[in-house]
Image (cartoon, rainbow, N blue to C red):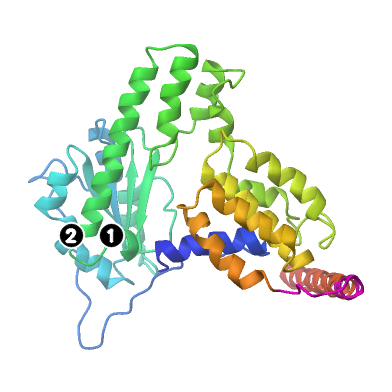
Amino acid sequence: MTTKKANKTSLLIALCAVFSAAAPLCPAQSEEPSAEQPPVAPEKADASKNPRRPETFQDALSAAGDDGVIAFCYGPDWNQRSVRMLKSFWNTENLEKATGQAILVAVPIYENPSPEQEEEANRISAGMPPVPFSVCPTVMMVDKNGTMYANLPGSDFLGDEKGATGIQNIAQKLAAHRKAVELMNKAATLQGVEKAKVLGEIGELPIEKPSGLVDMLKEADPKDTTGLIRRNEHSALQFLYKQMDTKDGFLKQDFHTTLKDLMVESMKIVNDTALRTEDRQAAYCLLIGQARREEGGSKRLKDMINANMKIDPNSFYGRAMPRLLALWSQERANESVDERRTRRNQEKEDEKKRRQHDREIKKTERNVNVE
């Protein structure tokens, strides 16, 4: 399981270097039981003793109030750490105290289930949103309508087997969800720009945005005088994918003549102060990556890096810029015009060959699948 820092680094690299394939957000985390320690059998909560711990997700959703449902996904036949955490973390009074009136349900995720296990898992998980990570354990948090607003996968978010970190993170997400419910109720009493401003506060909470948030903003502020529609519609990853060819995974335009066109698109985002600073800096990173390919340690590249850092020097992107400046500022700085032209032509030919090779591989794979 990668750390949060590594995840952020991967996003920065993806935006700067425009990788052709996105790395999985979280790799599957499988833990084989030790030969010296037999697998631990999962402990099921007794619903008759605690109404906050029903057996199935549907029962949990039926009993849910504003605090919603919190589901603990564990792997009985492939991740014994998650099984042990049922006792050391999930079935504890500390968790119940931290989760208010949320309904708690444990959901088994089998890798190689028997017919009986598959039937049991389907019965328990029926109606639950798809698990967004193939990692155990994972805590999914959904509202009373069954819509997921947060997920906490693996040891990065749940901590060690005692789960102190997990309890803290769950409590923070639940608090943000409660705030969202409060703001939504407040917005229902307002109109126009004042309503849009309250709805905009929901978009800043550290949980998933309500699916209809942008539509509600458009209704309240159709001219987007607050800039909140643009702010909540924009996605750094969607902007990246927009620039890429879905077939080849490279920039749509010619790979080595894109800086001018890309600058137009990127600077629209960079200069839109209604957007979040991290989204503006992410767009700048894409531009910086292309400038590095085309120009190496040019003055323009250095100016871009410094300008990106000034948007927010304390953000993740801002803190990374001095390191990029140190790494990239001297690359090909003394390259002549003729040397640059020769290099670009060679890289262009190499790129064409690479794309053609990829197409041939995909064509071969399709033919094999058909056969």
Q: Please say whether residue 350 is one of the residues in the magenta stretch.
A: no
Question: At x 70% / y 46%, what residue is drawn?
Answer: 266
Label for residue 158?
1
Pick the front one: 307 or 190: 307
Q: Which residue is label 2 attached to?
A: 89
* Residue 22 in sight from this viewpoint: no
Percent coordinates x, y for residue 182 in the rendering: 30, 25
Is the N terminus in the top left, top right, bottom left or bottom right quadrant?
Answer: bottom left
Percent coordinates x, y for residue 155 in the rendering: 31, 65
* Residue 85 in sight from this viewpoint: yes
Label 2 and label 1: CA atoms lie apart by: 9 Å
Q: In which quarter of the image is residue 137?
A: bottom left
Q: Give the range drawn in magenta.
A: 331-343
Disc 1 secondary structure class: helix
Q: Residues within 10 Å of mark 2 (few under 14, many from 20)?
A: many
Q: Please say whether residue 336 is one of the residues in the magenta stretch.
A: yes
Residue type indicated by callout 1? Leu
2 or 1: tag closer to the N-terminus = 2
Percent coordinates x, y for residue 80 in the rendering: 26, 72
Question: At x 44% / y 53%, what residue is drawn?
Answer: 132
Question: At x 69% / y 54%, what residue is drawn?
Answer: 287
Which dot, 2 or 1, sits closer to the camera?
1
- On screen, residue 307 versus residue 86, left or right, reads right
Q: In which quarter of the image is residue 118?
A: bottom left
Pick the front one: 28 or 150: 150
- On screen, residue 223 versus residue 128, left or right, reads right
